[in-house]
């Protein structure tokens, strides 16, 4: 299927309070069939797409332990849904909740709800969208919207979950997969047929760990320019001081 949609009816529940639960579950579209591993129960270094319903903030707990300071804009509220497209070379950093390689995400407070909860993943003309229906109002809300996603044909859908020192129940009630019908040009069809490796155009990771903005070229130029000017001034002052010292030395000698 070139264009498809997956609807998952699920329930996450348990006795843990105040984030004393974990770890979450994942929905996959990958080259290989399910193999046990460290990424929500499946293997790392996968090739394809992973959608992660993460219920435990590993990085937040580490930050608290190290007393590190982060701005509020960089903090995630868990449970959190994130997406990752991998060509087999990227490793999922579980200790940082996948921040370095996440391409999009949103908060989804799905634990211990008394109504049905759903997530839908849609791949349509190389656009990946994820929507959630978790408030019991039969309303879909946008979570992730990434254009330029290239996924090969013939991969496997799958679901896995994991718990660690903390536990939870991850119930998958139903999975519905639909083939979407959309008009395509002959060129679009040909291009999708030759996608061999998962990728994202103009890839930008959602690594918001650092609270800064990259310097512009003009800012960098002025910093370098004034640094050089400062060094030149210091050099001139040093030469003048050295010459004065030499003159004083000669006077004392004679």
Image (cartoon, rainbow, N blue to C red):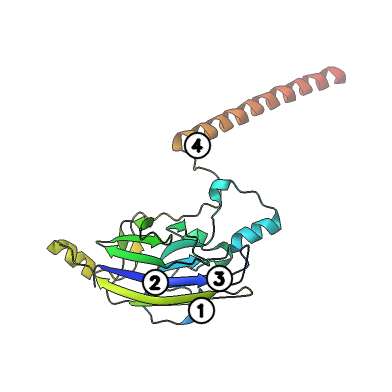
Side of 252 relative to 137 (left or right)? right
Which element is circle 1 on?
A: strand
Helix, strand or loop for disc 2:
strand
Image disc number at residue 37: 1
Residue 243 image position (x, y, % from top left): 73, 22
List the residue tagged with mark 2. 9
Discs 3/2, front: 2
Whichever of callouts 4 and 3 sits on the residue coming sooner in the sequence is 3
177 left or right of 83? left
Element under label 3? loop
State how far apart marks 4 and 2 are (Cα): 51 Å
Residue at the left extreme? 186
> Nearest the camera: 183 or 252?
183
Whether label 4 touches label 3, CB < 8 Å: no
* Upstream in sequence: badge 1 or badge 4: 1
Q: Which badge, 2 or 1, comes first in the chain's sequence?
A: 2
Q: Is residue 128 above or below residue 46?
A: above
Q: Mark 4 or 3, which is nearer the eye?
A: 3
- According to the image, label 3 marks what residue? 23
Disc on the earlier residue, 3 or 1: 3
- Quadrant housing residue 94: bottom right
Instruction: Give the side of residue 171 with respect to residue 70, left or right.
Output: left
Q: CA distance from mark 3 to mark 2?
A: 18 Å
Quadrant location of residue 194? bottom left
Q: CA distance from mark 4 to mark 3?
A: 43 Å
């Amino acid at each position: 299927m070139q264009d498809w949609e997956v609807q998952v009816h699920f329930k996450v529940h348990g006795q843990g309070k105040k984030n004393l639960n974990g770890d979450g579950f994942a929905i996959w579209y990958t080259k290989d069939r399910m193999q046990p591993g460290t990424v929500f129960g499946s293997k790392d270094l996968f090739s394809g797409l992973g959608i992660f319903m993460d219920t435990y903030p590993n990085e937040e707990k580490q930050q608290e332990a190290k007393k590190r300071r982060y701005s509020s804009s960089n903090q995630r509220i868990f449970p959190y849904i994130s997406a990752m497209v991998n060509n087999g070379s990227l490793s999922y950093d579980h200790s940082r909740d996948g921040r370095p390689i996440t391409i999009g995400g949103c908060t989804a407070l799905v634990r211990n709800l008394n109504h049905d909860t759903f997530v839908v993943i849609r791949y349509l003309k190389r656009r990946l969208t994820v929507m959630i229906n978790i408030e019991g109002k039969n309303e879909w809300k946008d979570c992730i919207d990434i254009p330029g996603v290239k996924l090969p044909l013939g991969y496997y859908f799958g679901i896995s979950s994991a718990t660690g020192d903390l536990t939870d129940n991850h119930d998958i009630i139903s999975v519905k997969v639909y083939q979407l019908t959309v008009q395509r040009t002959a060129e679009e069809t040909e291009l999708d047929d030759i996608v061999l490796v998962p990728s994202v155009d103009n890839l930008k990771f959602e690594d918001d760990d650092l609270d800064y903005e990259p310097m512009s070229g003009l800012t960098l130029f002025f910093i370098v320019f004034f640094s050089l000017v400062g060094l030149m001034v210091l050099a001139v002052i040093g030469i003048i001081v050295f010459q004065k010292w030499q003159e004083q030395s000669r006077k004392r000698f004679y």
